Amino acid sequence: MSRQHNLELVHKMYEALNSQDLEAHYRYWHEDMIWHGPPGFGDIHGVKGFIEEVMKPFYKAFPDYHARNDIEVADENFVSATGFLTGHQRGEWLGFAPTGKFMRMRFSDFWSVKDGKLHENWVMVDHVDVMNQLGIDLMAGIKGGR
């Protein structure tokens, strides 16, 4: 596919993410897609798994979810982007009770494109910074053990 097609594919997928249109993802992701999540998530296989295991819990925790890319790079086979995802924690997330606090999560994504759809996605997220913003001290257990 062309560089332009691949960028537009990611843009349309982000429109679906930001509008929480879960069914639209079937138009943008390859049927045998793999989402390689950040530490704690592992690999998710298939669009249904991505929706059920990643997006639904995230929307529940951050109902005002909004993601935006700041930098995008694409060629005929890959797209990469880095940006920020924002939202207020209104529900449990990663086992932590809702804080009501606003977070601004830095992320980087790399996607491969197969048959005109997103096939694999490698995701990097700065969870330590997000937890600090939510008032959760991930280092407390380590500091207390010294």
Image (cartoon, rainbow, N blue to C red):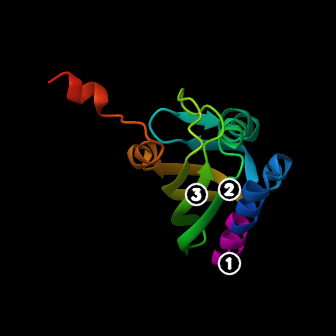
Query: Given this view, does label 1 or label 3 mark the residue nearer the observer?
Result: 3
Instruction: Say if mark 2 contacts mark 3, CB within 8 Å.
Output: no
Residue 4: image tag? 1
Q: 27 and 134: which one is in front?
A: 134
Q: At numbered mark 1, what does the secondary structure look like: helix, strand or loop? A: helix
Hey, what amino acid is under mark 1?
Gln
Label 3 Cα crowd, 10 Å radius (few <14 / some 14-19 / many 20+): some
Instruction: Say if mark 1 contacts mark 2, CB within 8 Å.
Output: no
Hey, what amino acid is under mark 3?
Leu
Q: At numbered mark 2, what does the secondary structure look like: helix, strand or loop? A: strand
Residue 113 percent across, percent down from the top left: 64, 59
- In percent of the image, x 45 and y 48: which residue is there? 133
Q: Is residue 30 left or right of residue 138?
A: right
Q: Residue furthest front?
A: 100
**Which secondary structure class fits the magenta region best?**
helix
Which of disc 2 and disc 1 is earlier in sequence? 1
Q: Is residue 94 visible?
A: yes
Q: Residue furthest top?
A: 145
- In percent of the image, x 68 and y 78: which residue is there? 4
Relative to 83, is 47 above or below? Answer: above
Which of disc 3 and disc 2 is earlier in sequence? 3
Residue 85: image tag? 3
Q: 92 and 29: which one is in front?
A: 92
Label 1 Cα crowd, 10 Å radius (few <14 / some 14-19 / many 20+): few
Q: Quadrant of the N terminus?
A: bottom right
- In percent of the image, x 68 and y 64: which residue is there? 10
Q: Which residue is mark 2?
A: 118
Give yes or no for residue 142 being in the magenta stretch: no
Q: 56 and 110: which one is in front?
A: 56
Hey, what amino acid is under mark 2?
Leu
Q: Which residues are magenta?
A: 1-10
